[in-house]
Image (tube, grey):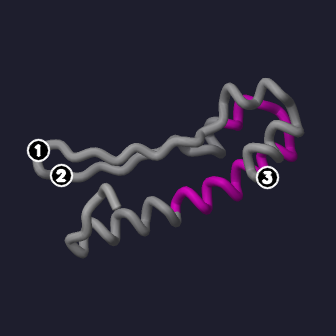
Amino acid sequence: SFAYEALQSGKDIGLLLPCNIIVYTENEKTFVSAIDPERAMSIVENPELKKIAKKVGIKLKKVINTIALNIMKGGKTND
């Protein structure tokens, strides 16, 4: 629904949407990363889009924190 909201403010915004989270293991360490939506959308002068980017950023942080917590507890990254 966030993507839909963003697209309503401008169709070309779809080119900038940060919709991916990357999880990978390297040298026995697990990495979780995602683009910061507020930073990514800051290049567009659109107040509505900035509000949406903030909401998405909060949700992404929660997801990344949940993944990190699961990893620290010995969980698998591919669950």
Q: Disc 2, disc 1: CB below 8 Å?
A: yes
User: On the image, which quarter does residue 71 sit in?
Assistant: bottom left
Name the residue beneath numbered marker 3. Answer: 51
Q: Is residue 53 magenta?
A: yes
Pointer 3: residues within 10 angstroms few (<14), some, or many (20+)?
some
Residue 29 marker: 2
Look at the numbered disc 1 and give the secondary structure of its residue: loop
Task: Indicate whether 51 appears above or below 17.
Answer: below
The chief SS type of the magenta part is helix
- The image shows residue 39, relative to residue 14, as above or below, that is below
Instruction: Give the residue type that dot 2 points to.
Output: Lys
Residue under the point 83% across and 33% down: 45
Residue depicted at 32% across the width and 70% down the height = 70
In the rendered view, does 15 fall on the left or right side of 48?
Answer: left
Q: Is residue 42 magenta?
A: yes
| Residue at 34% from the left image edge and 64% from the top image edge | 68
Mark 2 crowd level (few <14, some 14–19, many ≥20, 10 Å Cα) = few
The residue identified by callout 1 is 27
Q: Which residues are magenta?
A: 41-61
Identity, as a three-letter code, of the amino acid under mark 3: Lys
